[in-house]
Amino acid sequence: MAGVARSGRGVSAGGAMYSLSGIRIFSELAPRDLALLAAECDWRTVAKDEIVASTAQGGDMEGVTFVVAGTVRMARASGPVGRISYRDVGAGGQFGEMSVFGIPEADLTVIARDDGLIATMNVGRFAEILAREESVSRALLCQYALLLRGQEAMSASPVSEEGEAAIGGTGAQRLYIELLALAEPHVGKDGADALLIARLPRHRVLADRISTTEEAVARAIAELVRSGVAERDYPGLVIKNEAALRGLAGAC
């Protein structure tokens, strides 16, 4: 694990002052307030694939953590046994704030997707900020509203009379988003940059995760292969055109 560094005024990382200015929910705070908050955080550099936090392994969330640089992936058990949900938090985002509202972060593992920098604030201090700074509480509320709207849209996949989830629209988008979440950077056989899912889950498993049918999953993956966006590399899947897949997922 990378070392933990307690920040303070004048403490720098790589020659640059530790700063929370890029954190979206703090966007309306004055520079002086941001500097004071930065001095109260525990700062830490993380390396790609490092486990940043894990309540799934019996650990505790140490506070509210802000992703200053890099991206982390949150993975937690969800629904049926063996089902995992994923969410990436990029620079400017945060995680662990649900503990402020008394909601434990159970079965959660956070892994760094690349080298980065994070800052962790005491839960009590973050609660004080929410109570005092209307702009922060409003920004957090808007963030949750957008997440909820996205979840509602993803749950609205149409189902045909034959009981098969339609490939068009949100059903297919959910699969493409899931494939992007599972993929890792990879260099293809031709030397080109690509993404690789080393072991593609069974169609039934994927269908359960995104609330559709095995047939729908099979057709969508077959279409990706037919169009050249991906190719099978058993037991995995190589995504040859990430931009195209993100476009299909509506993530561009």
Image (cartoon, rainbow, N blue to C red):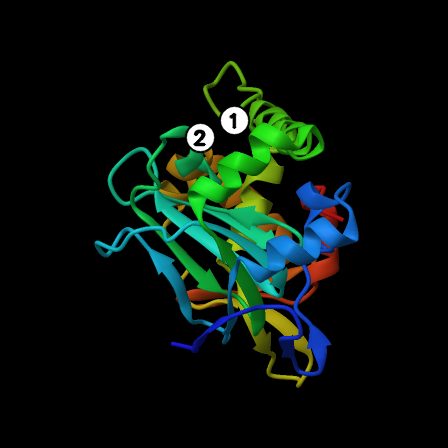
Quarter holding residue 167: top right
Query: Would you say residue 245 is visible in this rendering?
Result: no
Amino acid type, label 1:
Ala
* C-alpha separation, residue under disc 1 versus residue under disc 2: 8 Å
Q: Secondary structure at mark 1?
A: loop
What residue is shown with label 1?
165
Tell me if residue 33 comes above or below residue 160 in the rendering.
Answer: below
Q: Can you give x and y, in whole percent of width and height, for residue 72 in the image? A: 52, 59
Q: Residue furthest left?
A: 58
Identify the residue under disc 2.
Answer: 211
Residue nearer the viewer, 191 or 128: 128
Indicate which label's residue lies in the foreground, 1 or 2: 2
* Residue at x 53%, y 24% (from the top left corner): 155
Of the numbered discs 1 and 2, the one sitting upstream in the chain is 1
Q: How many marks?
A: 2
Residue 247 marker: none
In front: 98, or 228? 98
Quadrant of residue 150 within the rendered picture: top right
Front one among 81 and 92:
92
**What amino acid does circle 2 point to?**
Ser
Residue 198: which quarter of the image? bottom left
Which residue is at a point 39% across and 37% down the rendered structure image?
99
Q: Give the x, y percent position of residue 170.
A: 62, 31
Marks 1/2 in contact by CB < 8 Å: the verdict is yes
Task: Report x, y in % for residue 141.
Answer: 62, 27
